[in-house]
Amino acid sequence: MLWCTSGVGEFWSLILDERKRLLELAIDYARTVGITQSDMDIGSVFVCYPGRSDYFTHWGGAFKHAAAQLGLPIGDYPHSRAPQAEPTTAAKGRIETAYRRLGLLENREQPGVSR
């Protein structure tokens, strides 16, 4: 217990208190800018393939659709990890709704068209 009385304990207490405060600020900022809302809008479309809803995986088709909405290159690498199925209309709608709420699609003329 000598380390607790030599100032080391106080040092770590101050460090942890500061990190806790920074985390609280980050959480507040995320709520303010709508990050938590976009998570709720998108839900599990990136990790749950509708053809097998109990199977947890990344869904390449959803990521490609999301990238296309933002005008990012989606690539044409044919050996991306499965599943590469086309996202459902509902999944596409969830991605687009989330991006619109974040203000990412305001100036897009043709959402969904890759460039």
Image (cartoon, grey):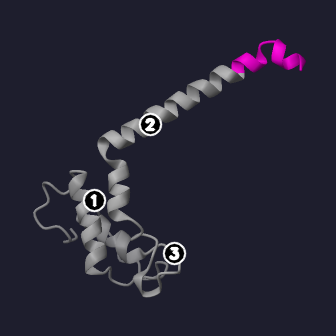
Q: Position of residue 78 (x, y in %)?
A: 42, 82
From the image, tell me which residue sits under label 1.
98
- The magenta segment is 1-11
- The residues tagged by marks 2 and 1 sit, at their Cα atoms, a distance apart of 20 Å
Give, as a three-letter code, the residue at label 3.
Thr
Q: Nearer the viewer, residue 9 or 59?
A: 9
Q: Secondary structure at mark 3?
A: loop
Q: Sequence-wise, which precedes: disc 3 or disc 1?
A: 3
Give, as a three-letter code, the residue at label 2.
Ala
> In the displayed structure, does residue 91 sit left or right of residue 48?
left
> In the displayed structure, does residue 80 sit left or right of residue 6?
left
Query: What residue sits 82% from the left and 12% below the top?
Result: 6
- The residues tagged by marks 3 and 1 sit, at their Cα atoms, a distance apart of 21 Å
The stretch drawn in magenta includes residue 2: yes
**Relative to 23, does residue 37 appear above or below in the rendering?**
below
Query: What residue sits 42% from the left and 87% below the top?
Result: 51
From the image, tell me which residue sits under label 3.
57
Q: Nearer the viewer, residue 81 or 91?
A: 91
> In the displayed structure, does residue 9 sit left or right of residue 19?
right
Query: What residue sits 36% from the left and 59% below the top?
Result: 40
Q: Secondary structure at mark 1?
A: helix
**Relative to 62, does residue 14 appear above or below in the rendering?**
above
